[in-house]
Structure formats: C-alpha cells, structure tokens
Amino acid sequence: MPRKRIILSATLFTIIVFGCGVYSGRRLASKANSRGSRQAQSIVENATNHSLLLKREKTPSKPEKAEPPKLRSLEQVEASLAEIMTRVLRERFKAINDLVASVNLADVPHVLELAEKTAPIGFRTSLRNSLLERWAQTEPVAAMDYANKISIPQERQEATLAVLRAWAENDSASAAKWVNQLPPGTLRVQAIEALVSVQKDPLAAMALLESSGSSLDRFRDAAQTIFESWAQLDPQGAAAKAISLPRGGFRQQALQIVASTWAWNDPLGAIQWSKTIPESSEKHQALNAIVTGWADSDPKAAAEFLMSSDGNWNRKNMLYQVISVWANKDTPAALAWVEQLPDTGEKDRAMYSIAAQWAQTDPKAVMTYLETLPGSRFRLGMMPYIAQQLANENPDEALAWAQRLPPGEGRNQVFNAALTQMAQRDPEAAAKTALEFPPGRQRDQLVSSVAAQWASVDLDAAKQWVDQLPDGTGRREALQTVYSQLANTDPKAAAAYAQSLPASSMRNQLLSQVAAVWGNTDLSAALAWAQSLPENETRLAALNNLRDGWVNSDPQGAAAYALNLPASESQKMLFSETLSQWAQNDSEAALKWANSLGSNESRNRALASISCGLAESSPRDAASLVASLPAGPEQAESALTVVRTWAGNEPQEAAAWAASFGDTDLRGNAFQAVIATWAMQDSAGAEKWLNSLPAGSPRDAAVGSYIGVLASTAPERATSWIEEVKDPSTRLNYITSVAQQWLQSDRGSAEAWLQKLNLPDETKNQIFHSGE
C-alpha cells in the first residue's frame, strides 16, 4: 500500500508541552468551534507536513506518462555539459538526470571521459554514477569493469553499487551471480542490499539475506523494504517471520514495520499480536508503531485506546501525536473529545497539539486568543510560532502585533520571528526595521536573523549591508552568519575572514564550518589550507571536519599525518577516529599499516582504534585484537567499545566475553554496558543472565545499570531489584531515580509504592516534589 511520511515541522511544540502549566482548554475550544465544520474542512484541504505520524494514500493518482527523452549527438551533449558547468552548483545537480537521459547508449563511454573532468567531487561522482546506471541497462559487464577501475575506494564502491542496481533491475540472476563471487566485507553486504531493493517477492528477498552468510543486522535498511511488502500481503506470516528472527537491529526494524502496516487495516488484530511479544523494548516499539498506524485510519479509537489501561504504557509520548492527526482531520471533534479529559498533563499536551493545527490554518484567531492569556507560559511558548505563521501571510500585521505587546521575552520572540519571515520576502525592509530598534541585545539578535535570511537569497547584498553596519556585537554576529553562507560558494574567502577574527568560539566554529564545506567541493585545497593553520586546537578541529573525505581517498596519508601531529587529546581523538574509519572500509589494509609502525606505543594505539572500527562488522576479530593489546587504559577502553557494539547484535556472546575479563572493575563496567543494551532488546533474557551472575561488585554494577533501564520502561519491575541493593545511600539513589520517572508516567502507582517504603516522611516528600 503506497504511503507518504508527513513530518512535524513545529518541533517547538514537542519541547513546550512538557514545560508549560495548565490552561483553559474550553476557551480555546470555544474560539475554534465558532468556525465549526468550515475550519475542519479547511484543515483537511490544507494539510501540510505537520504530523509525526504515518499517512497512507489509499488511492494514489496514476503518474502521467513521461515522453521519452530526445537523444542528442555527442557534440550536443558536450556543449550541454559545458553550459551546465557555468551554472551554480545546485542547478548543476538538477540538470544531471535530463542530460544523462539524452545520451545515446553508444556514446556513454565518451561522455564518461567528459564527466571525469568536471568538478567539484560531489557533482562529478553523481554524474558518473548516473551515466554508469544508464550504461548498465544494456552493457552491465562493461559498466562494472569501468566502475572497478576507479582509483578512490569510496567512489569505486558507490559506482559499483549504482551499476549493480541497474543490472539487477534487468537481469537479477546474472547480477546475483556476480555478487556471490565477492569476498566477505562491506561491499558484499551493500551489494546484497542492492539486490534486495529491486526484488519484488519479499520471501525471496528474505531468503537472499539469510543465505548471504552475514549477520542480518548488517542489512537493517533492507528490513523495511521486505517486511512492508510482506505485511501488506500476509501480516500474520510477516509477524511470525519477524518474531522468529535472531535478536538485533534487523529484527527490531522488522517488528516495527509489521506492526505499523498491520495496524492500518486491522489495529485490534495488531494489538492482540503485540501482546504475544515478550516484554522488552521491542514490544513497546511495536505498540508505538501500531498506534501510529491506527491514528491515521481512526484517530478517535487510537486516542481512546491510549486513555485506557491497556494504553497507559506510553500515553504521555503518543497522545500528542494522535491528537495532532485527529485535529488535522476534524478539529471540532478532536476538541470536543479533549474537553472531556480531566485537567492533567495529558489534557495539556492534547490541547497544545490542537493549537498547533489551528495555527496552521488561522494564526490570527490564535493570536487573538493568546492576547487573552497574559503571563501564561503557554502564551509565551506559542507566540514565536504563531508569529512565524502570521508573518508568512502578512509580515506587517505580525510586526504590528509585536508592537502592541508589552515589553518582555514574548515581545522579543515575536519581533524576531516576524522579521525572520519578512527577510525572506523583503530583506531590505526587514533590515531597515531591525535598525530602528535601540542599540542592545534585541537589536543585535534581529540584525543577525535578518542577515541570515538575506544571505540565503542574495549573499552579495547581505554582505554589503553587514559591512556598513557600525562595529559591535551585532555586526560581528551578522558577519559570521553571512560568511557561513559564503563558505558554500567561496570557502577560500570565508576561511580568510575567519582567520582574521580574534580567538573565540565564534572563530573556531566558522573555521570548522569552512573546512566541512570546502572538503566536499575541493578536498585537496581544503587539506592544504587546514595544514597551513597554526598547530593548535583550531587546526585539529578543521582536520577533523575533513577526516571522512580524507580517509576515503587516502587513508594511509590521513593516518600518518594524524600520527605525527603534536601530542594532545584532540590529536589522539583524530588519530583514533581515522584508524577506526579506515578499519570499517578496509580492515586488512589498516592492520597491515598499523603493524608496520616501529613504535610499540603507536602500534598499540593504532590497533586499539582498529578494534573499535571492526566491532560492528567482526566483533570476534575485534575481541581477539583487543586481547592481543598490553594491559592498560587503551586496552580497557577498547574492550568496552567492542562490548557495547557487540551487545547490540549478540548480547549473550558479548556477555560471555566480558565475563572473561580478569580486572574486576573492567568486568563490572563491561557488565553495565551489556545489560544496558541487552535489556532494551530482550529484558527477559537479560534478567535471566543477570540472575546467573555470582555475587560481587561486577554483578552489583550490572544490577544498577538494569534498574536504570527499567526506571523508564517498567518501573514497577525495577522496585524488586532495588530491594537487592544493600548499601543505603546507593539504594536511596535508585529509589529517587525510579520514582522521578514513575511519577511522570503513573503518579498513583508511584505514590503507593513510595508510601510503603521504610523512609522518613521528609525524604518521601522530597521525592514527591522532585517528580512534579
């Protein structure tokens, strides 16, 4: 069943909901109800991307038949490419598809020669891959031979996968035969994913993964493709398969996809199935996915389920989202339902959700309503968002509203939001308005906001305006904003400006940004610039922003350079992350280089970093590498990194390895890492392992970690584990932690538990208040 995802842009509300007090829902309801069903219809007609929930289209419109592209001669293609290269970078990318579609298949090798001469790297790679995909439709072997000859490893891998996808579309059997001859490693995994992405039969796709010889957790991205198709055809069969999979990330993804898809057609059936999942984070994630799908088809039923005892487990997090979808469909009905809720946090969150939808369709009405609530935190939190919506329609009216407001934080927020929106349409007018404010922090903020918006539409004009501003904080902040934009088009000039600034966090931030942008367009020039910087933290920060591209193109050069920098914590981090990334791309080459180092200290540091990179794909190899290191802080840190990563896929094996650690403190830290990950996936299995541990400080550390997990997922179960803690101070800390979270989700049960505890009344009162 086709569907599209609709994402809530008003992130502000998610934060506001938890910090604001109770307000009168009926006053809001009366305002909205006065518009009756007319507004509800308007909301449906003007639905935008303001829901966190999944929306499916039952009857998607048939795509119009596109006319076949007109083929061009090689000379015409060459002229067209030359013209494209004169455009701004964004427009170059847009032109790739049309250009490639117009190339005669016989001319593709010649056009590839032209493509290799283009810049920057990102554009060249995209153009090359598009040409290879076209070539692979008729000559996949020749296209693959070309891809395999690309010298830069990362680009070669991307090109190979581009060819493979096109090959599999036309001849999946031959493409699969080619994949089967690949050696184990990252490329083989990604190649199998490419085959799965074009496989029409979900059972065949799943069989392909299971016969690959690799852990399913290396194919997490394929889980959605397979199980969404499967659950549409046979939800029970898809669910049975998902629950039979080995625990790990692939299984978690499969369960969520099955739950969401099943709930669209049969939410009650999906709910009944979810009850058969063992108590764990997987069960809660599946239930979240069910409610998500249910809300889109029947939001009232989904909301009533959350308010029932069965839905209490995640009412706090999900009700806001469900009401948002309902209000988008039928605001009066959603309001009427929310009005009958008791005055609790659930009602507050629900009313905020409705207000968010109302603001999308009638910000003036919400503005009028807010003016009747002086001093409320709800009003203060809503004002910037309403100002943005109002300024989209009428910036002058938004400014007039701001001027009517009394001085204070709310007025400043409205001015900032209104001018930011105005600057997108009329930056000169917005700039003039900002400078009419008296000197001070508010004007500085307004000037910076206007500069940011102006620079996004006309960088030269924004720069000229900022250059003539009087010196001060406002001008400096605005200059930083403008030069941040300049980094996208002229990183060399932006770098020169950043280096001229006095030492500050602003200067470091701008230099890092320049490095990141410049590295994407001209890595060699960016590296030369970064290496010319003074030997300090700024240089290391710039190099760290260039690390990904450098390691992909010249891992040995990147590693050698990082190794020979002056010793510091930042240098150690750069070296470690460089080796870790290299190991993920090509562990054999990384190990060969590390073992060639003459210094024992450098070699051990390199091997420790490589073990961290190996942990995701080959945890056993990583563990063996860690075991070969000399005892000390580096070995201990590497061991914990490997344990954490390994536990995410194979917790029992990770736990067994952790139990072999001779150092008691290290074993305790490792047990904490294992249980924290294992309990989120399979709390029953984790608890069984925990009960099998012998008494001692490592077990105590694991118990504490487990209590921390249960505090947020199953606080009533955490209470029995707290009873095992003997140290009074530690026990009180656990009680407080669990109570604070339990009081938020189910205050009645938490209070009943606290009252039974043998604690002084003063301590109990302190805990009660800490959970408010």
Image: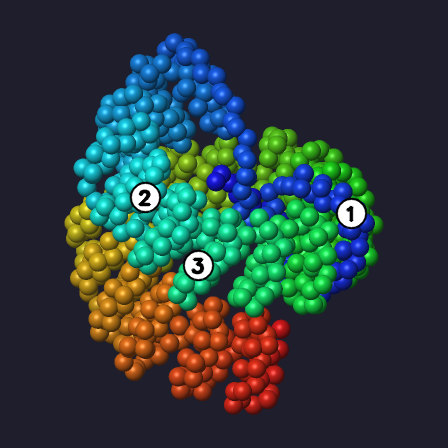
Q: Is residue 485 visible?
A: yes
Disc 2 residue type (three-letter): Leu
Q: Is residue 650 left or right of residue 536?
A: left
Q: Is residue 674 above or below residue 351?
A: below
Q: Nearer the viewer, mark 3 or mark 1?
A: 3
Disc 3 residue type (three-letter): Trp
Q: Nearer the viewer, residue 169 or 408?
A: 169
Q: Is residue 496 above or below residue 99?
A: below
Q: Nearer the viewer, mark 2 or mark 1?
A: 2
For the residue labelled by badge 3, is the local secondary structure a helix, a strand or a loop?
A: helix
Q: Is residue 192 left or right of residue 101?
A: left
Mark before the other along the chain sequence, 3 or 2: 2
Q: Nearer the viewer, residue 733 or 404?
A: 733
Disc 1 residue type (three-letter): Gly
- Disc 2: which residue: 203
Within 10 Å of disc 3 (Cα), the crowding (few <14, some 14-19, many 20+) is some
Residue in view at x 81 percent, y 49 percent: 34
Q: Nearer the viewer, residue 558 or 282?
A: 282
Tell me the distance, in whole angstroms, between the alpha carbons under discs 3 and 2.
21 Å
For the residue labelled by badge 2, is the local secondary structure a helix, a strand or a loop?
A: helix
Q: Is residue 669 visible?
A: no
Within 10 Å of disc 1 (Cα), the crowding (few <14, some 14-19, many 20+) is some
Q: Is residue 640 left or right of residue 8?
A: left
- Disc 1: which residue: 36
- Disc 3: which residue: 273
Query: In the image, which disc is placed on residue 54?
Result: none
Tell me the distance, in whole angstroms, between the alpha carbons under discs 3 and 1.
39 Å
Mark before the other along the chain sequence, 3 or 1: 1
Residue in view at x 34 percent, y 26 percent: 133
